[in-house]
Amino acid sequence: MDYIRDVEAVKKVLIIDGSGDYSYSMARSLSYCKDYELHLLVLPTEFFLHKLKHVHCHTIENYTDADAWIESIESVVKKYNIDLTFAGDEKAIEFLIDHQARLSEFTKLPTLLSKDNFNIARNKASLSQFIFENNLSQPKTFIYKKDIDLTGLSSLEFPVLLKLPSGEGGAGIEKFTDETTLKEYLLNNDFDEEVLCQEYISGRDICISLMCKDGDITAYTIQQCLINNPKLYAPSLSVEFLYHENVLSEASQLMKLLNWQGVAHIDMRLNELTGQVYVIEINPRFWGSLIASLVAGVNFTWLYCQQMLNLPAEYHGYKHVQFIHIKTMFEYLRGKHILLSPLRLWSLRTGLSFRLYGLRRWLGYH
């Protein structure tokens, strides 16, 4: 765990959406680092984060009242001399972007993405159009809007996936095997947003988790699916880390065009017959497999804080390991799951060593 540092000046940071979907993984990864004191604004219903001994939780009633949220942030910042205030989830990141002028009066914020580019990244339809205009790689796509001519569907090869631009975690994705059925579905449903009709790419999910400064990638891990999620189109249950030149190249071009700042997780699809990779979507935030990246040797939360505080943020690459949660491993041994790659026992990781280290810190053995 060579990224764990002992320094005289411990930095204090605040995550403003401590009860967000990704904050627990962020808090866990940063709680292993002795050079940071972590504070979180959490909802009254929060339970898990209080179990982390080296995390300080401060209660906020909700994340919907902007003025109250800002007041709570200011109170914690001034009371504890917070060095950096940041967020993990999309809505909270958007909140920082929208209110950065007011927040910057009393706290240091990370370098934030422009609102226009943030909106391009978070909306699948906008991103698809951006990728098309810049000649990057994506599955052939038809964007459906109400009352639009549907003749463009005939240019797609079926099967085709229908996706809602705002959907997350595979929610709302439907698969169609013929044009007639898809047309009927589009005409018989009243969508309140644009809908993507995108060719299905036979192959495997592959992703890149990364951090950028002024559009240049400063750290990354590449991982592909090792065990599929039983829920269709949902994130993988287990991943394996590897290097893939085409994935890195596509991501580098896309991030440069968007002048990306901070972290992102880009989902791609790999055609294993041709080696071609296709950009599927960008998650403009921290991600669900953050602990897997940590096990591979990259603590993105620590690197993010270091970079945003203009402190040394050494990135030394990542280990090509296979990461399987202990529970998923037992399910695999019982025949519940199928591995998409041979199991490599010498590079198999479960994250148990980090749990044991966290327990030692909790018990006071630093």
Image: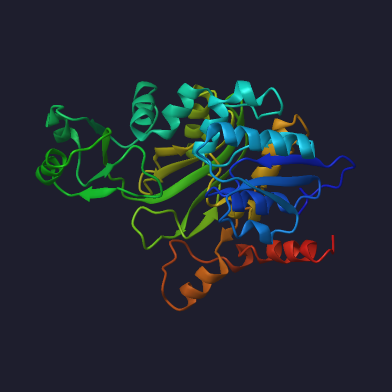
Measured as percent of width and height from the top left, residue 9 is found at 87, 39
Q: Of residues 50 and 176, which is closer to you in this image?
A: 50
Please tell me whether residue 97 is drawn above or below residue 167 in the rendered image: above
Query: In the picture provided, is 262 more to the left or to the right than 197?
Result: right
In the rendered view, does 148 fall on the left or right side of 20?
left
Q: Quadrant of the N terminus?
A: bottom right
**For the C terminus, which image quadrant?**
bottom right
Q: Position of residue 319 (x, y in %)?
A: 64, 52
Residue at point 34% right, 49% down?
A: 171
Quick check: can you spot residue 211? no
Depth check, front residue: 269 or 214? 214
Residue 11, horizontal then vertical, whole percent: 79, 40
Q: Residue furthest right?
A: 8
Quarter assignment of residue 14: top right
Residue at screen point 42% across, 42% down: 268
Q: Is residue 120 visible?
A: yes
Task: Give the residue at the far bottom of this rendering.
Answer: 334
Looking at the picture, the colour scheme in use is rainbow
Q: Residue 8 vs residue 275: left or right?
A: right
Q: Nearer the viewer, residue 186 or 253?
A: 186
Say which quarter of the image contains residue 122.
Answer: top left
Number of on-image labels: 0
Q: Name the residue at 74% across, 66% down.
A: 359
Instruction: Report the front residue among 228 and 270.
Output: 228
**Residue 60 placement, left or right of 166:** right
* Location of residue 287 in the rendering, given as x and y in whole percent from the top left corner: 53, 46
